[in-house]
Image (cartoon, rainbow, N blue to C red):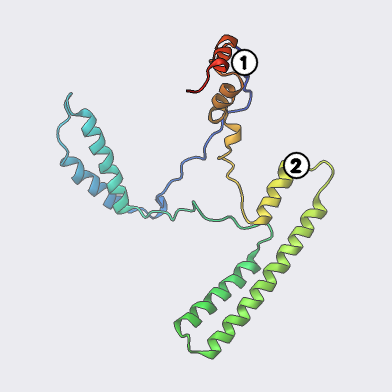
Amino acid sequence: PIILNYHNHSPPIKGPPPLLKYRIKKADWDKYSDLVRVKVHSLPSVSSSNFLTCYDDFTQCLISSADESIPIKNSARGKISSPPWWDSECSSSVRRRNEAEKTFAADLTSLDSYLVFQRETARCKRLLSKKKTKGWRDFCESLAPRSPASMVWRRIKSFRGYLSDDYNVPSNDTSSWLPDFTNKLAPPYVPTQDCLSLLDNVTPS
């Protein structure tokens, strides 16, 4: 057998901090206190046989009271990050195009709405193309011989329209690939030369 030692000096990957889903500044604390007080009174008495159930019920009491009295934030997960060349002018142009599209969709028989929608779509397309070209040119001019390759590739990906998650890098997580790699490189068992010779001498029936 071959014994391998892998010294992993890379720091452990930490996930993003948990997001607070409540808008604390807009919380109705009086309503929250009243709800908690009412729900706690309805909980059963704690004993050695039901303390885990009581704990779960108490936790659910706090969560449900918060859901009823504190507004919840809109989650930003899943949203596509804007490319590096995007600015407020791009957002305004896209907003005007979308408004023109909604106006035309509300009355598909209106020629004026159709022409406005076509005009705003063409303007938006030209502007985004211009901004992207200028952004790429500025990026290329900012490169230097000592520019880190990781930064260069990440910026290229952002120009292509997608960004990798900093907290989702499986290649840096050795637990996801190291066991299979070592088993293939040095399997725990291989047939001996005698077994291979016997297999070679066996003729199919």
Residue at x-position 21% and y-position 33%: 54
In the image as oriented, which residue stretches furthest toward the top?
Answer: 194
Q: Is residue 203 above or below residue 121?
A: above
Name the one closer to the observer, 4 or 130.
4
Helix, strand, or loop for circle 1? Answer: loop
Image spot of residue 100 (x, y percent)? 54, 79
Q: Indicate left or right for 134 with 12 as reference.
A: right
Image spot of residue 21 (x, y percent)? 41, 49
Q: Which residue is mark 1?
A: 4
Q: Is residue 169 above or below residue 118?
A: above
Quarter of image, res 161: bottom right
Between marks 2 and 1 in the image, the one whose residue lies nearer the viewer: 1
Residue kind at label 1, given as amino acid type: Leu
Q: Which residue is mark 2?
A: 149
Image spot of residue 45 (x, y percent)? 15, 32
Residue at x-position 82% and y-position 54%: 141
Name the one closer to the observer, 148 or 195.
195
Helix, strand, or loop for circle 2? Answer: helix
